Every structure is written in structure tokens, then in C-alpha cells.
Image (cartoon, helix red, strand yellow):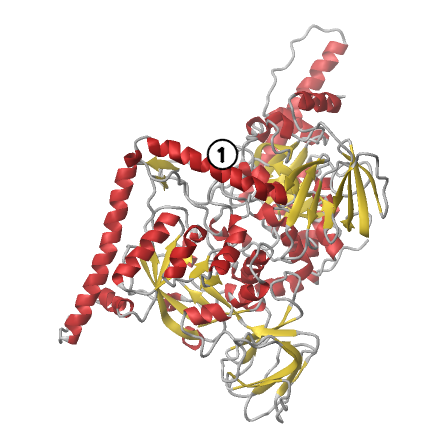
């Protein structure tokens, strides 16, 4: 019910959910990811959904036919860890910031939505930062470039929350002078904060249970005061809100699994989880998913034992693994990042592709509608000119809900228009007081990747 | 695993399966057979099935018909490809271990004028980063001091001399190729905004103020070079007072040592080119995010570019999404000499993929391979010894099972300084150790 309402609301707000025309993609190799590879294969898109996938699909009258000869059609890439399209999402002043959420600060104008779309990404999990043991709520977006903030939100996706362990929440790295230290400052304290919060949430849940029982008995009682910090944690206790936990070292991973088990909670995903390979048996037994980088290491102590074989080792022990970006740049070539699991750890090509499509979709609780090319699923897909695990592969088109929101050809054609517009604006600027201005710009440049904080 | 004892026996080569070692030979030599050899020599086609004989650190014979001498260790490379070892043209390998722990980082000295400092002084031969890079085919690298990738503003000045090293050796002296290969200069940026670390916020200033500071910084650089010239002249005239800073700049003003100028923006690149022209010194541009805007200028002045990582975001919101990917191809087409570098340490192993990424966006594959082998060797005056597979050259080479720019390709053997090196590293050993952890009983 809620699903339908949101869906309608999004449509009314002008999100690109209006499905014009049937589309058939034919002639290329279709990497369904879950049901094998069809070469050549065909895909029929209707009403924003995949209607048929096969070696020969129905071609309805008036359908737009896209010739993908020589190309590779794959499901849209799902990034299980992203911080794009959002402003200021690390509420670090308190150890538990579950009253905040990235869904409140979605920025539909962030150009990274488009840049990643150009890399084949169609869904991103926008997580809160990692400054606190229990962080804010996350929001899952579709890369519906052009839609407003509400229109980007993936309707019906299960809600989630960020947890964080280790160096970041204990804030062991340099804080600006004059900033007071905040509890916790150790991994022991991190576990304590999480346990205390769960205890509070249990008590809060009990208050409401008692209140409802009293009401049922016909007593006139005042309702308990609502607590926006604890409500999401009650949902965690009840298993209706997914926990996505930032973690690195094996000891902190285990302590989280154990404190969660104490309260009957299953962690949905361990994020980064760079030492996950060391405790893969335990993670598999707990039933958590793992979402990791392909090969970053050594940028801090807790990343010193990171190995590029992590994804493969965890997969071999039965853990559902995804490769994420945590970076607007890295997200643009997640297909290459997936290829690294073939090189380091010997994953099959299909397993590698799963790590950026169906696996993250399942981890986010949207695997029934996203992450593979199957009839009935959302028509989110990317068309590469070579096998997407090739270093040379260039994405040519990206579809979201059946609509082509990126086309390399169209992008290149638009560049002249953009250049002309820019020239015109610059001319207008220079008509003013040119002396006080340089040729507009610049902010701090992003350095090479080792400068980026994780 | 063990590396090879260079003075005696081949102890236990980590070349499982394909290598047979004749123990006890007087002179160590290796022969790689049945390989497709990409010599990259000017105008040469690959040798479809050939051999390379290596002795005393050098390639002594290469071709379709090379007879294996008695006692040579044989590496059967049937179905595999041999390329020159890859060279990371700017890195910080050995200068930094764990980025967040300053005690392990020796990249940036205090002060803005440190031409007398040399990277080789602080390269840690036991750094875990070296074997990791090596295992993916990086055999030698330029190691440069300075804040090479940092966040905008600040850090302008001369950070020291870049050193070129083999990524193997018991000591840094054994690793040495050229300890004083170039002078690293971070060009001042003209920016009206700068990030204030104390307040974690952006400071703003007027364009006039920013310009004045920029001009002052450039003028100071000119004064230092002038002083270095006077110092050299005074030395020739018999003056005996010693100034290590000015002495270090002697080879720069003498035209023997290139300035490796880190500049990203169009304005900064133009400024740096103008400066080196006026000063009559050699320049290699590092970084060059906006080099695509000044292609003609770079061609006219014969200035090569060592590009920073291809995999980065566009500098501007309205820049084409793929500008960083197309820049190498655009520069190559215009006739600019292009090399790739990672500017990093832990990511040095990704060098072939930074080059490969540009291939999808217009850079010819062969040019991409050359840009991480031959071209950097030429840029740093090492072409006689490095960069191609030819008789007489130092045997830094790799044996791979396919295209080295493709991620899925595996590096099978690596020779550094004429010796096969172990491909073991921190990652591989952790992998093997934890892969053998018992599984729970079901």
C-alpha cells in the first residue's frame, strides 16, 4: 500500500517514470547475471520493466529497436556504499545519531549522479558517515537524473541505518584543536555504545507495549513520549530496518556480530569489512552480507591487512559479497573493480559481475526487483562496447526504469551546446568588472586516490 | 619464498612449475623460451616465438633463435607474452607506509625550498608496498618527495630530488638507478579559496590578493635559480663557501636535470611553461589535469607530461564526464609526449590500469604500453638501459599471460635488475594463510 502511494507521489512530482514506448535491445551479448549469458540475446522493455529476455523476444509494433551488435548488455550496477547526491551527512557530535538520515538531504543536482550513470550505475545506497557507532539512516536512490529529491528515492526499498566501528567512531585521528573528545575513544567503548543503545531501545519498545496493553484493558493512560533516536533502533530489533556496519578489523567485526546476536539482531551488511576474510566462518554463520572495496589498502592502520583477495575468500566461505565504491570516482568504473576479483582470488566472470549487481541488490533487500536481467524486474541496464570486465570497456547507454538516461552519443552531441553556453556566460561576465575576476573557478582539486579519506 | 642469492646458487625460485634450475652454475643466467616478445624497440614487430637470454643483469641475446647455454635456468613461457618491466614515472614508493600514521610517512619536509633533499635518502627497502607493486609488473619507479596529490593550495615550492630505483634490492644503494633524476617543484596555485585545516572550512580572498601572492612565489623561484647560477659561477671562480641548496640546483640551471613541475590548472601550466622558457631550464609537467587545454603550447615547447591518475573526477562540474579518460588520447593525438604515473604508493600496482583506462577513450593500446615503459625511460635519460627489450639492456621485464593493461591478465614472472624476483608479498601471504584456515564442521 505504502509502496503504491510513494510510487504515485513520485510520478506526480515529475520523476521520469512515464514510460513512453516499448524498447527492444537486440544483437548483443546479454549478461543476465543470474540466468546465464545469451549471445546473441534480446531484451524487451515495457512500462519500465523487463518484459522478456531471450534469444528472440517479441518485437511489438512501434517499439524502438536498439542495435547492440558487438556489445554487452548487463544489469545496471548497484553501489552498496555511496555518499553522492547528499549534503553534510556525518553528524559526529553524538555517539548515536539515529535521529538523522541522509534521506532528508538528498541533492538531485549533484552531477555525480550523472557521472556514475555514465559508468553504468543505476542504484546507490546513500549512507551516513562513519563518525559514530550508531549513525544516521540511509536512503537508496535510483540514478533518475533529472528527477527531484523525492523522485530519486527508490520507492519501497527496506529502510536501513549506518553503524560504524574502529578508528572512525573512536575518532582516533586528529581532531581540530579545541574540539572536545567524545565517548567512545576505544573499540571497547564502541561496543558499549551499541549495547547501551539496544538496551534503551528495548526499554522504549516495552514502554509502548505496556501503553498498548493498558489501552487494551480500557485504562486511560498517556502515551509515552516519542523518541526519534530510539524508534529506528526498535525497527532494528524487530528486523525491519537493515544495519549497514562500517568495519575493518576482525576483532571489531566479531564484537559487533556478538552484541547484535545478544539482542537477536542480524547485521545485514558489513561495509568495507577489509579483514572479513579472517573471520569469514563467523560472518557466514551469522548470516551477514559483506560489501568491500576491491583493492585499497594501507591508508590507515586498520587497512594494513586489507588484501584484494578479500571478496573471493569471503565468497568461498559462503558469504554474499558485493564490491562497492564509497567514492564518486571509483563508482564510475565498478565494472573494473569487479574484474579485480577474477585476478585476485580467481572468481568466475559471472561471480564477479554478481558482486556489482544482484549481490548488492539482495544485500539492500531489493534483489527481487533489481540486479539481474530477468522478466518482471526493473528495466535498469547498461550497454558496454566490450565485455564489462575489460579495462577497455566503455559504457554506451544506461537505462533506468526503461528510460535511456545516459547515451554516450547524446552526451557527446550535447558538449557543443554546453561549450557555447559557457562561452556566452563568460562573455557576459567579462562585460562586468573584469579586473577583479579571473577566468572563473576554482575549488580545491581532488588529489589522487590515496588522499581520499575512507 | 626466497629471492635469489646473487653470488651463488639459485636457492629456491618462486617460479613454480615452469622453471628448472641448474644448480651450481658458475655464472647465473636465465633463458625465457617460446614467448611472444614485445620488444617495443623502435619499428620492431613482436617476436612471435622467441627467447631472451639474461646474464649479469642484462639481456645478452634476444630473438627467434637463441641457443640455451649449458647451465642457464630455463623458463618456458609458451603461450605467454614478455614486455619490458613497467615504470611508475612518479610515485612515493618506500617513502610512505601507512598514510594516516605520520611516523611512517617521509614524503613532505618542512619549508618551501628543499632542493638539496633526495628521495633516495628515505626510501625504505623493506616497505611492504614494494613487493605488492612488483608482483603486478612494476619493476622500477621514480620516487618523488612532496605533497603530490594533496588537497588544493599550499605546498608550493621545491620539495626535493626524485630518485629512480629498482623495486628490488637488499639496500637502497642496490636499488639505485639514478638518485638525482629530477627536481620536484610544486607550482603555486592561483586560488581565491583555500582550505583551512585549523577551522575545517574554506578561506576566501580577493583575486588581487591571490594574484599578488602567486606572482611573489613565482618571482622567488626565479630568484633562487638566479642565486644558483651565481653560486655556480662563484664556485668556478674559486669561492669555497658551501650552500647545499644552491649547489643542488646547479644541475637544474645547468640544463642537466629537469624540473618536474606539478601543475594542474591551465593558468598554472602556462605560468610554469613561461617560467622555464625564460629560465632556459628543462621541464617535465606532472599531473596536468588541464593539459588538454594547452596542447599546442606543450607541443611548441617540447614539454612532455607525466599524467596523474586517469581514474579521477573532472575538475569542473560542466567538464565532460570523461575528460580525465580522454585527456591522454587527446594529448597523444596532438603530439604531446605522454607517460602515466600513479603519484602514490599503495596504488602503484594499478599503473597498467590507469594507462588501460585511457585506451577505451582513444589512446592507442600500443601508445599506452609505451607510456609506462619506453617513454618514461626516455624522459629520464635512461633509454640506453631501460624501456625496451634489446640486447645490452638491463633485464627489467615481465612475463604475463595476456595484455598487461587488462585487469584479468596475470603476471607470471618478474625480472628486476636481471634477476627473477619472488612474486610473494604481504597480500599473497595473508591470502594463503587465511585461505588455509579450517572451515567449520557442518
- Please indicate, yes or no, whether residue B51 appears anywhere in the rendered image: yes
**Camera-nearest residue between B235 and B329:** B329
* Res A198 quadrant in image: top right
x then y, percent, for residue A13? 64, 22
Question: How many other residues sit within 10 Å of disc 1, few (<14), some (14-19) or many (≥20)?
Answer: some
Residue A380 vertical position relative to residue B23 in the rendered view, above or below: above
**Camera-nearest residue between B113 and B255:** B255
What chain does badge 1 belong to?
A
Residue A130 vertical position relative to residue B403 in the rendered view, above or below: above
Name the quadrant of the N terminus of chain A: top right
Name the element at disc 1: loop
Residue at 61% x, 75% y is B82
x then y, percent, for residue A243? 65, 36
x then y, percent, for residue B129? 51, 63
* Res B278 quadrant in image: bottom left
Left or right: where does residue B310 sit relative to residue A443?
right
Residue A406 vertical position relative to residue B182 in the rendered view, above or below: above
Left or right: where does residue B305 sit relative to residue B190?
right
So how many labels did they put on this image? Answer: 1
x then y, percent, for residue B221? 25, 56
- Please indicate, yes or no, whether residue B312 appears anywhere in the rendered image: no
**Camera-nearest residue between B170 and B228:** B228
Residue at mark 1: A92
Amino acid at each position: 500500500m505504502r509502496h503504491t502511494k510513494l510510487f504515485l507521489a513520485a510520478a506526480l512530482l515529475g520523476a521520469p517514470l512515464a514510460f513512453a514506448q516499448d524498447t527492444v535491445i537486440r544483437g548483443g551479448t546479454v549478461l543476465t547475471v543470474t540466468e546465464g549469458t545469451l549471445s546473441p540475446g534480446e531484451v524487451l522493455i515495457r512500462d519500465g520493466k523487463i518484459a522478456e529476455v531471450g534469444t528472440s523476444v517479441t518485437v511489438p509494433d512501434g517499439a524502438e529497436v536498439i542495435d547492440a551488435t558487438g556489445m554487452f548488455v548487463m544489469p545496471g550496477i548497484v553501489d552498496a556504499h555511496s555518499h553522492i547526491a547528499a549534503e553534510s551527512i556525518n553528524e559526529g557530535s553524538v555517539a548515536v545519531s539515529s535521529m538523522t538520515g541522509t534521506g532528508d538531504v538528498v541533492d538531485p543536482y549533484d552531477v555525480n549522479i550523472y557521472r556514475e550513470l555514465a559508468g553504468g550505475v543505476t542504484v546507490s545506497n546513500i549512507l551516513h558517515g562513519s563518525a559514530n557507532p550508531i549513525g544516521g539512516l540511509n536512503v537508496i536512490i535510483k540514478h533518475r537524473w533529472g528527477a527531484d529529491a523525492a523522485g530519486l528515492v527508490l520507492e519501497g526499498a527496506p529502510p536501513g541505518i549506518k553503524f560504524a566501528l574502529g578508528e572512525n567512531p573512536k575518532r582516533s585521528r586528529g581532531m581540530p584543536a579545541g574540539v572536545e573528545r567524545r565517548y567512545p575513544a576505544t573499540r571497547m567503548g564502541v561496543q558499549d555504545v551499541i549495547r547501551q543503545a539496544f538496551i534503551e531501545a528495548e526499554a522504549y519498545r516495552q514502554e509502548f507495549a505496556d501503553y498498548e496493553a493498558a489501552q487494551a484493558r480500557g485504562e486511560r493512560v498517556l502515551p509515552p513520549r516519542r523518541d526519534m533516536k530510539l524508534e529506528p533502533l526498535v525497527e532494528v530489533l524487530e528486523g525491519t530496518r537493515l544495519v549497514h556496519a562500517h568495519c575493518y578489523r576482525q576483532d571489531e567485526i566479531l564484537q559487533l556480530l556478538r552484541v547484535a546476536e545478544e539482542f537477536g539482531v542480524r547485521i545485514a551488511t558489513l561495509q568495507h569489512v577489509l579483514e572479513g576474510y579472517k573471520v569469514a566462518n563467523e560472518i557466514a554463520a551469522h548470516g551477514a552480507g559483506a560489501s568491500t572495496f576491491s583493492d585499497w589498502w594501507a591508508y590507515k592502520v586498520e587497512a594494513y591487512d586489507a588484501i584484494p583477495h578479500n571478496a573471493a575468500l569471503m565468497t568461498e566461505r559462503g558469504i554474499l559479497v558485493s564490491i562497492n565504491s564509497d567514492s564518486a570516482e571509483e563508482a564510475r568504473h565498478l565494472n573494473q573493480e569487479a574484474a579485480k576479483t577474477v585476478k585476485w582470488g580467481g572468481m568466475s566472470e559471472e561471480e564477479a559481475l554478481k558482486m556489482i549487481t544482484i549481490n548488492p541488490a539482495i544485500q539492500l533487500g531489493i534483489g527481487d526487483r533489481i540486479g539481474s536481467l530477468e522478466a518482471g524486474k526493473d528495466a535498469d541496464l547498461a550497454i558496454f562496447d566490450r565485455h564489462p570486465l575489460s579495462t577497455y570497456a566503455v559504457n554506451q547507454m544506461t537505462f533506468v526504469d526503461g528510460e535511456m538516461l545516459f547515451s554516450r552519443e547524446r552526451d557527446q552531441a550535447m558538449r557543443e551546446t554546453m561549450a557555447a553556453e559557457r562561452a556566452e556566460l563568460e562573455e557576459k561576465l567579462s562585460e562586468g568588472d573584469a579586473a577583479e575576476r579571473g577566468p572563473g573557478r576554482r575549488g580545491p582539486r581532488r588529489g589522487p586516490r590515496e588522499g581520499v579519506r575512507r | 619464498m626466497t629471492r635469489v642469492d646473487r653470488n651463488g646458487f639459485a636457492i629456491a625460485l618462486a617460479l613454480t612449475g615452469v622453471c628448472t634450475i641448474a644448480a651450481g652454475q658458475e655464472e647465473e643466467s636465465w633463458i625465457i623460451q617460446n614467448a611472444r616478445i614485445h620488444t617495443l624497440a623502435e619499428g620492431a614487430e613482436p617476436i612471435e616465438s622467441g627467447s631472451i637470454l639474461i646474464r649479469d643483469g642484462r639481456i645478452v641475446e634476444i630473438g627467434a633463435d637463441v641457443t640455451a647455454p649449458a647451465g642457464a635456468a630455463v623458463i618456458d613461457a609458451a603461450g605467454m607474452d614478455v614486455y619490458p618491466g613497467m615504470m611508475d614515472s612518479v610515485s612515493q614508493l618506500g617513502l610512505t607506509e601507512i598514510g594516516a600514521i605520520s611516523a611512517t610517512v617521509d614524503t613532505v619536509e618542512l619549508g618551501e625550498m628543499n632542493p638539496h633533499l633526495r628521495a633516495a635518502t628515505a626510501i625504505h627497502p623493506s616497505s611492504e608496498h614494494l613487493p605488492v607493486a612488483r608482483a603486478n609488473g612494476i619493476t622500477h619507479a621514480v620516487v618523488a618527495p612532496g605533497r603530490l596529490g594533496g588537497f588544493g593550495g599550499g605546498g608550493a615550492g621545491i620539495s626535493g630530488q626524485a630518485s629512480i630505483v629498482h623495486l628490488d634490492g637488499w639496500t637502497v644503494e642496490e636499488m639505485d638507478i639514478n638518485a638525482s633524476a629530477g627536481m620536484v617543484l610544486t607550482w603555486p596555485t592561483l586560488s581565491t579559496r583555500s582550505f583551512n585545516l585549523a577551522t575545517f572550512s574554506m578561506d576566501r580572498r580577493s583575486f588581487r590578493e591571490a594574484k599578488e601572492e602567486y606572482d611573489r612565489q613565482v618571482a622567488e623561484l626565479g630568484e633562487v635559480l638566479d642565486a644558483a647560477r651565481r653560486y655556480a659561477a662563484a664556485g668556478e671562480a674559486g669561492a669555497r663557501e658551501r650552500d647545499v641548496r644552491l649547489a643542488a640546483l646547479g644541475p637544474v640551471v645547468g640544463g642537466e636535470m629537469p624540473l618536474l613541475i606539478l601543475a594542474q590548472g591551465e593558468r598554472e601550466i602556462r605560468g610554469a611553461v613561461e617560467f622555464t622558457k625564460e629560465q632556459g631550464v628543462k621541464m617535465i609537467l606532472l599531473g596536468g589535469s588541464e593539459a588538454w587545454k594547452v596542447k599546442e603550447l606543450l607541443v611548441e615547447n617540447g614539454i612532455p607530461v607525466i599524467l596523474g591518475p586517469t581514474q579521477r573526477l573532472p575538475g569542473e562540474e560542466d567538464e565532460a564526464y570523461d575528460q580525465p579518460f580522454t585527456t591522454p588520447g587527446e594529448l597523444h593525438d596532438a603530439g604531446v609526449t605522454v607517460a602515466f604515473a600513479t603519484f602514490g604508493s599503495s596504488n602503484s600496482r594499478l599503473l597498467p590500469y590507469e594507462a588501460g583506462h585511457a585506451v577505451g577513450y582513444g589512446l592507442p593500446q600500443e601508445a599506452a604500453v609505451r607510456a609506462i615503459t619506453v617513454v618514461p625511460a626516455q624522459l629520464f635519460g635512461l633509454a640506453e638501459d631501460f624501456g625496451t627489450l634489446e640486447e645490452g639492456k638491463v633485464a627489467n621485464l615481465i612475463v604475463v599471460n595476456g595484455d598487461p593493461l587488462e585487469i584479468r591478465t596475470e603476471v607470471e614472472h618478474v625480472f628486476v635488475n636481471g634477476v627473477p624476483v619472488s612474486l610473494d608479498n604481504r597480500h599473497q601471504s595473508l591470502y594463503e594463510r587465511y585461505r588455509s584456515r579450517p572451515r567449520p564442521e557442518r
